[in-house]
């Protein structure tokens, strides 16, 4: 079954319409807040739509848990694993994938997010699926999860999620990864669903444009708040889990925050706030190289994928 996704359509009264709400590319500073709101609303709408098909009725419907994906639930960046799988299916060449890996490593070693790279990620991140059918990408995502992601799930984090499920609470992934892939990961883990980056789709085909921002930083918090309104959640009773200081907006949007495999800045923040910390890494290897940037690596990898896709598109047009 094709993962539910928002499509361009004429708005009805009270219905969120990303085609109407999403601003065109323009003044980055002026559009930032609006794009964040659009991204959060679109992600929450997709998550709520998918959850509506579930037959599971939570016994504690006003409490929930929100888990970041990359380096919190899964080792590494899910979008990069997805790109590897697409490379094996001839979406990219091995050389293209090597460039993406170098870009990711360079970003991690620098230890900070570059604003221009973030804007490239926002505006071009899904260029590599432009013109592709959603159903095909979902099918590839299912295959790639089995091939490259299933063995990379942190068993400790998965156990934490199960504790919430066993308590009758709903559990969502919250990630910058495209929502179709995020929903596959959530479904395979037995979670309620996922909040992810939502792309524009027309007639079942990706246009290559995003609805608002990628779901990162403040957009994650916006999505959580929008989902809480849709699903009747009491955020003071909810819990959020992340490895990255970049997720502070999400972590502080709920009543309880937990650091999982934290980067240096988040570890310090968790200590100062009295938050619980779980570290499932062996030998703390992830702390040794560019830890402050690890969580953002997946987002910038999306920009790298887009850059490769755009270069190939321009080359074909010559």
Image: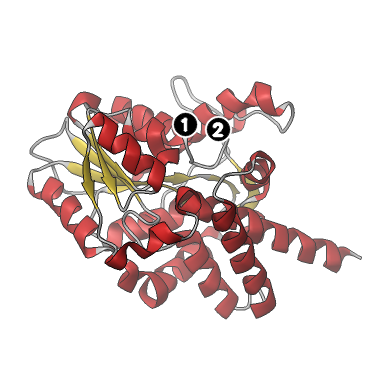
Instruction: Find numbered disc 1 in the image and state the secondary structure of the residue it sits on.
Output: helix
Percent from the top left, x then y, of residue 52?
A: 28, 42
* Contact, mark 2 vs mark 1 (Cβ under 8 Å): no
Percent from the top left, x then y, of residue 238?
A: 21, 33
Q: Is residue 101 visible?
A: yes
Image quadrant containing the C terminus: bottom right
In this rendering, position of residue 140 left or right of residue 253: right
Give the image quarter of residue 153.
Answer: bottom left
Q: Is residue 215 above or below residue 289?
A: above
Percent from the top left, x then y, of residue 46?
A: 41, 42
Q: Which mark is residue 261?
A: none
In this rendering, position of residue 98 left or right of residue 281: right
Q: Earlier in the sequence, mark 2 or mark 1?
A: 2
| Residue at the image position 72 percent from the left and 33 percent from the top | 25
Q: Which mark is residue 18?
A: 2
- Whole-angstrom CA distance, mark 2 to mark 1, is 18 Å
Residue at the right extreme of this rendering: 318
Instruction: Find numbered disc 2 in the image and state the secondary structure of the residue it sits on.
Output: helix
Q: Which mark is residue 218?
A: 1
In this rendering, position of residue 198 left or right of residue 119: left
- Pick the residue in front: 60 or 21: 60
Q: Is residue 130 visible?
A: no
Image quadrant containing the N terminus: bottom left
- Pick the residue in front: 115 or 39: 115
- Pick the residue in front: 210 or 99: 99
- Pick the residue in front: 234 or 15: 234
Viewer-side label of 2, 1: 1
């Amino acid at each position: 079954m094709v993962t539910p996704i928002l499509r361009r359509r004429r708005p009805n009264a009270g219905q969120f319409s990303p085609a109407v709400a999403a601003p065109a590319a323009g003044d980055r500073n002026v559009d930032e807040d609006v794009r964040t709101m659009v991204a959060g609303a679109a992600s929450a709408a997709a998550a709520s739509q998918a959850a509506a098909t579930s037959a599971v009725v939570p016994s504690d419907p006003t409490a929930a848990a929100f888990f970041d994906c990359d380096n919190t639930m899964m080792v590494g960046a899910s979008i990069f694993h997805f790109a590897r799988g697409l490379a094996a299916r001839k979406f990219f060449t091995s050389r293209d994938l090597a460039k993406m890996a170098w870009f990711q490593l360079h970003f991690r070693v620098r230890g900070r997010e570059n604003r221009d790279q973030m804007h490239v990620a926002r505006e071009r991140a899904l260029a590599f699926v432009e013109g592709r059918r959603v159903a095909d990408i979902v099918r590839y995502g299912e295959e790639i999860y089995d091939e490259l992601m299933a063995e990379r799930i942190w068993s400790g984090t998965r156990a934490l999620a199960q504790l919430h499920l066993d308590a009758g609470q709903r559990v969502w992934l919250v990630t910058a990864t495209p929502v179709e892939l995020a929903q596959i990961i959530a479904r395979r883990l037995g979670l309620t669903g996922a909040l992810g980056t939502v792309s524009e789709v027309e007639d079942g085909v990706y246009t290559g444009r995003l609805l608002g921002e990628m779901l990162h930083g403040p957009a994650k918090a916006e999505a959580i708040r929008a989902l809480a309104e849709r699903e009747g959640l009491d955020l003071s009773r909810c819990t959020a889990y992340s490895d990255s200081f970049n997720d502070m907006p999400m972590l502080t949007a709920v009543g309880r925050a937990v650091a999982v495999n934290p980067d240096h800045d988040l570890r310090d923040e968790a200590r100062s706030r009295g938050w619980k910390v779980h570290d499932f890494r062996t030998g703390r290897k992830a702390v040794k190289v560019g830890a402050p940037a690890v969580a953002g690596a997946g987002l910038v990898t999306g920009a790298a994928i887009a850059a490769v896709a755009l270069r190939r598109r321009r080359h074909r047009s010559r």
